[in-house]
Image: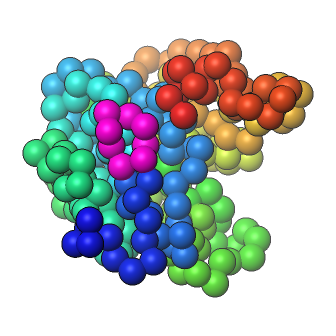
């Protein structure tokens, strides 16, 4: 344990296949959005998956535990986050199924080559560089604001590394939905499934989950929304069963 954790870090139990993840409370810790994305993304047997901007590795770790995918790769530009992800993968004994690569999303197609993956997932920064007040903690700022990459970078590179008919799964904020759909279409990915996420049944959505297919035909299905909390402030049955939170 002493070799796995560095000063100030903690080891969190994901309550899934005895998997754990290393997090730094002073940096950026994963949230409900990553958990929802891991439950929304469909990974079939023997498929290869890329997570663009994997942070501490939460999505590859959960997808490896939940699915029968062949291999999972996380791309992360911040070396500290990538290092935590690698140590989490090693602690979980997932090193034969998960690779963590330090690199820039804007160069993903150069790093991995075109048409390399069956599935791409991403929980990208939600805010534009000029939106709101930047967090003085750089790790949190990079995770939340489009400082090192833009939404267009993520979607463009995701399209290039996907095989024909490959699937792209993303979680984002509803206020960027028009941009998301426009960029998917621009880069030859057809939005196929959209699901809003509401904190409570009577509150407006806080997140949107979307699936796009590279070269897919035009048909968008809007699914029943996800409600996170019931009237008592407890997680709903769907969150506990489908998303395993």
- The extreme bottom residue here reads 136
Q: Is residue 135 left or right of residue 186?
A: right
Residue 242 appears in the picture as rendered: yes
Q: Is residue 87 above or below residue 73?
A: below
Does residue 2 appear left or right of residue 37 in this picture? left
Residue 184 at least partly seen: no
Residue ID at (68%, 77%): 134
Q: Which residues are magenta?
A: 13-20
Residue under the image location 44 percent in, 65 percent down:
10
Between 101 and 117, the one lying in front of the other is 101
Task: Give the total number of marks visible in the rendering.
Answer: 0
Q: Residue furthest right?
A: 202
**Would you say the magenta stretch is mainly helix, strand or loop?**
loop
Residue 31: x %, y % from top left: 57, 50
User: Which color scheme did the rendering employ for the protein?
Assistant: rainbow
Whole-percent x, y for residue 179 in the image: 63, 47
User: Is residue 87 toward the left or the right of residue 191 in the image?
Assistant: left
Seen as rendered, the residue at the extreme front is: 1
The vertical placement of 17 against 218, above or below, is below
In the picture, the quarter occupied by the C terminus is top right
Name the spot of residue 198 as percent of width and height, x first: 75, 33
Q: Nearer the viewer, residue 244 or 210?
A: 244
């Amino acid at each position: 344990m002493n070799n796995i954790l560095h000063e100030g870090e903690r080891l969190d139990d994901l309550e899934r296949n005895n998997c754990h993840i290393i997090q730094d409370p002073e940096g950026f810790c994963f949230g409900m959005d990553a958990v929802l994305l891991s439950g929304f993304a469909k990974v079939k047997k023997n498929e290869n998956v890329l997570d663009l901007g994997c942070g501490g590795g939460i999505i590859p770790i959960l997808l490896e535990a939940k699915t029968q995918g062949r291999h999972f790769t996380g791309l992360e530009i911040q070396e500290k986050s990538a290092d935590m992800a690698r140590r989490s993968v090693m602690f979980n004994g997932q090193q034969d199924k998960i690779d963590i690569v330090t690199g820039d999303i804007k160069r993903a197609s150069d790093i991995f080559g075109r048409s390399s993956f069956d599935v791409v997932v991403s929980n990208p920064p939600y805010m534009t560089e000029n939106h709101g007040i930047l967090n003085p903690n750089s790790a949190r700022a990079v995770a939340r604001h489009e400082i090192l990459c833009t939404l267009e970078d993520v979607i463009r590179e995701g399209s290039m590394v996907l095989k024909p008919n490959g699937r792209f799964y993303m979680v984002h904020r509803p206020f960027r939905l028009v941009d998301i759909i426009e960029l998917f279409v621009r880069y030859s990915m057809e939005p196929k499934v959209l699901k809003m996420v509401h904190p409570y049944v009577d509150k407006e959505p806080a997140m949107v989950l979307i699936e796009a297919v590279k070269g897919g035909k035009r048909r968008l299905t809007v699914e029943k929304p996800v409600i996170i909390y019931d009237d008592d402030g407890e997680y709903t049955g769907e969150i506990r069963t489908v998303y395993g939170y």
